[in-house]
Image (spheres, rainbow, N blue to C red):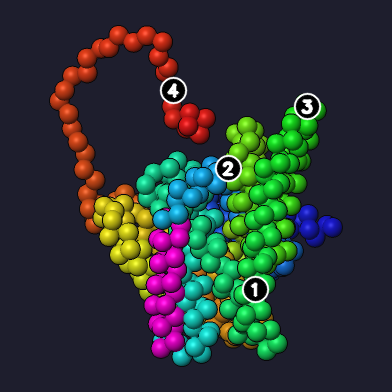
Amino acid sequence: MEQILEGFLLVAAISVALNVIFKKFQIPTIIGYIVTGTLISEFFNLKSNDEISHIAEFGIAFLMFTIGLEFSFKHLMSMKKEVFLNGGLQVCLSGFVMGVMLYYALHLKDETALIAGLAFALSSTAIVLKTLNDNGDVSKIYGRKALGILLFQDIAVIPILLMIDMFSSQDASINELLLKTFTSAVILIVVLFLLGKYVINWIFYKVVQTNSQEVFIATILFLVVGASTLAHFFGFSYSLGAFLAGMMMAETQYKHQIEVDLIPFRDLLLGLFFITVGMQINFVVVLSNIWLVLGLVFSIMVVKAIVVFAVLNIYLKRRVAAKTALSVCQIGEFALAVFGLMTTRNLLDVQTAQIFIAASVISMFATPFILKKLDVLADLVEREVVVESNETLKPQKLKNHIVVFGYDRLGQ
């Protein structure tokens, strides 16, 4: 118990100190958390374990839940082009190109190169959505396009995990695995839909009558963790279950209060998640393969950016396509889980997995800086057109009108 408290104290002290320093230089707190994880792993020999990683993963789940609160089922269907067309093309094209690169450059087996290429096609939901949320850019055109791609990537984790099972298992047939996944998806969606339509409103009505904020928060936590665990039970990611739970609660009249009450838990667990990301860096492997790691980071980010830009440039302005492409060009946190699973299933050797993990973390480390300079970088592709008007606004006589101050979440 004392060791746990000492470890917690050390992590809290380092993360607070680093973020205070980094804030003076306008460096995002995400970087502070990743550096904290790297420092405590390298110099204090504190290593991430499965229990900590599972708890930290709920940081992404809570983030996806708050995003789900902004999207009803009707809203999601209105984004089907962003999710299924843009996201599908991005994952398939990026995964194929990077799979071919890995096959010839690192001489990986066919199936290993394919799965690794698809894993590298995934972007960081945690970093991108947190930054878009903080900047209020989720509702902008490039924010919607990025969100659609990220949502499809969350869904794409399922077939990627299915491939790992197929290539590492000698028992189950492909048809059996596909049937099992399809059946699980149908059951999960039906269960959550029925709960959202007939049960959730009644539960919150009863909870609100208690006039207890503690009971209200406990109910939210129970529903989020419950939906995430249910999704995981059926073989899907925690974050996908949390996103569906958020969409269920978006239909209730309590959505804004739910979001406000959940933010502290979300941010705390997200911080823990980024610390565990930093703890996965092995400096010995990174330094001994530094040029390979950096070359991998550069190649993957460039390929992903080009693919997304090419897909979106067909029907969007070049500037919007460029901003979206730069937003999702990094390697995501789910790739770390995929590489870990590939290692345990003997599809990937430990050293190559460490190189892939190091490349993933470095790309995530660079992402907040890219997002911070997104407009400047987009200007290199196409400058933003500013329309100036010399017309003088004339006063109008209004009656029985509404004045809205600000246009944040409550205004919307």
Q: Which residue is mark 4?
A: 405
Instruction: Give the mark toward the camera: 1 or 4.
Output: 1
Q: Residue shown at 48%/28% (left/top)?
A: 411
Q: Residue shown at 22%/18% (left/top)?
A: 393
Contact between marks 1 and 4 (CB within 8 A): the answer is no
Query: Is 88 one of the magenta-colored residues?
Result: yes
Identified by mark 4, the residue type is Phe
Q: CA distance from mark 1 to mark 2?
A: 31 Å
The earlier-in-sequence mark between 1 and 4 is: 1
Q: Secondary structure at mark 2?
A: helix
Residue count near mark 2 (Cα–Cα under 10 Å), binned few <14, some 14–19, many ≥20 = many
Q: Which residues are magenta?
A: 82-104
Contact between marks 1 and 2 (CB within 8 A): the answer is no
Q: CA distance from mark 4 to mark 3?
A: 31 Å
- Helix, strand or loop: magenta stretch: helix
Q: Which residue is mark 3?
A: 209
Q: Does 54 sit left or right of 140 as displayed?
A: right
Q: Does 411 sit left or right of 372 as displayed?
A: right
